Image (cartoon, rainbow, N blue to C red):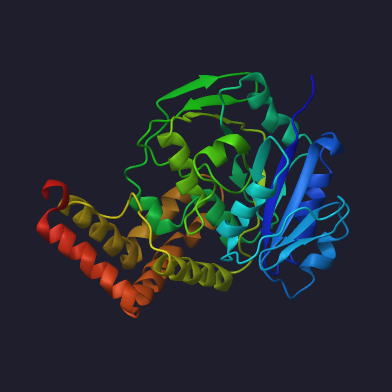
Amino acid sequence: MKLPLVSFGIPTYNEESTIERCLESIFSQDYPQDRLEVIIIDDGSSDQTLEICARYPVRIIHQSGGEKEGASGEAKQAFEGASGGPESGRRIGVEAANGEFVVLFSADNELARPDWLAQMVKPVVEDGEITGVRPPVLASREDSAINRYLALMQIPPLEFYLMWRLRPPEKVIAKDGYFVEILAPDCYPAEIGGNGSLLRKDALLRVGNVPANGSDIDLICSLVSEGFTKYAYVPKAVVYHHYVGSYWAFAKKLWGKVRWFLQYPREYPWLPRRRRDFFEMLKWVLFCSSFIGPLIHGFRLRKKGDPAWLYHPFACLTQVLIYGACFLTSKKGLSSVRAMVMAVVKGVEGGK
């Protein structure tokens, strides 16, 4: 059986602290090297990122001006005028990929085992109707406590409470080493997207590729809405996400995330659309601001085995403060808040 060509698209910007570990884990895979392609999409790194990448057989694309010749041979494409940012980088990576499948990867990701790729391609080789495969995204025991906490949460703490519209797959089928998941057209698949998800390139291009000013989660929603509802989950194909190394880095990430949202507003399923949703969100904002509520919840969650859960009350309060500061000190943020409140007052979707 001939294994498919798989392309990893990795956006980078000053990633010297993580990129070597990332690339080493990819090129240590027990997967035929001639069936493996790695594309670095750099957004103007000024540190040692590109020097480190040049030690590996990768293709390097500069978002601001074309492709650099690397170990893979002559440059084939140029991408002038890219908007920058990781989502734009992922979009470029999909377009440049030669593989039948694309792995949406990040520079702070690391494959936990050498048979990771072999396990990830197994579902799509066995079932041609499977559009994508998702891995578990975890933190290693060597990571900082705040990073382990965020890996346990999977999503930022406020969204953890607000995403009540998340729906499980309509159907889950157990297979040998993986699970097939059939997603509902109106679900919000928060666990599928970046950090190691493997997707069919032709399906991505059919729905318009990664949204230039959107999110990898928006991409999956587009796929599902177009009928690509069959996915797989491989429990053993763990990806380590070395997201932050300190609490200060976590706060900076939150600040950058909300500023990006204000610059490129989009639809979030957990934002209130009806009065009852608005009061539900307000309830959880007040809960996260109380510190006591998340502290009690954190102690309960700590029973799952990792004391990193005790970061929970601090992370909840920090996110509310940063989100509040960004929205209330920004003209666009204030406009968004006013529009949301007016929509609720007028009774959007029936106002009930």
Residue 139 x %, y %: 63, 51
Task: From the viewer's side, name the closer residue of 42 and 193.
Answer: 42
Residue 66, by quadrant, is bottom right
Residue 44, by quadrant, is bottom right
Residue 235 x %, y %: 61, 33
Residue 325 x %, y %: 36, 77
User: Is residue 126 shown left or right of residue 5?
Assistant: left
Task: From the viewer's side, name the closer residue of 49 and 223.
Answer: 223
Residue 174 x %, y %: 55, 19
Q: Please tell me how many numbered marks the rendered image carries.
A: 0
User: Is residue 333 shown left or right of residue 133?
Assistant: left
Quarter holding the N terminus is: top right
User: Is residue 42 shown left or right of residue 34?
Assistant: left
Task: From the viewer's side, name the closer residue of 328 and 282.
Answer: 328
Q: Residue at x 32, y 67 (%)?
A: 289
Residue 268 vs 4, above or below: the answer is below
Residue 44 vs 124, above or below: the answer is below
Does residue 166 appear anywhere in the picture? yes
Does residue 352 appear anywhere in the picture? no
Residue 257 vs 197, above or below: the answer is below
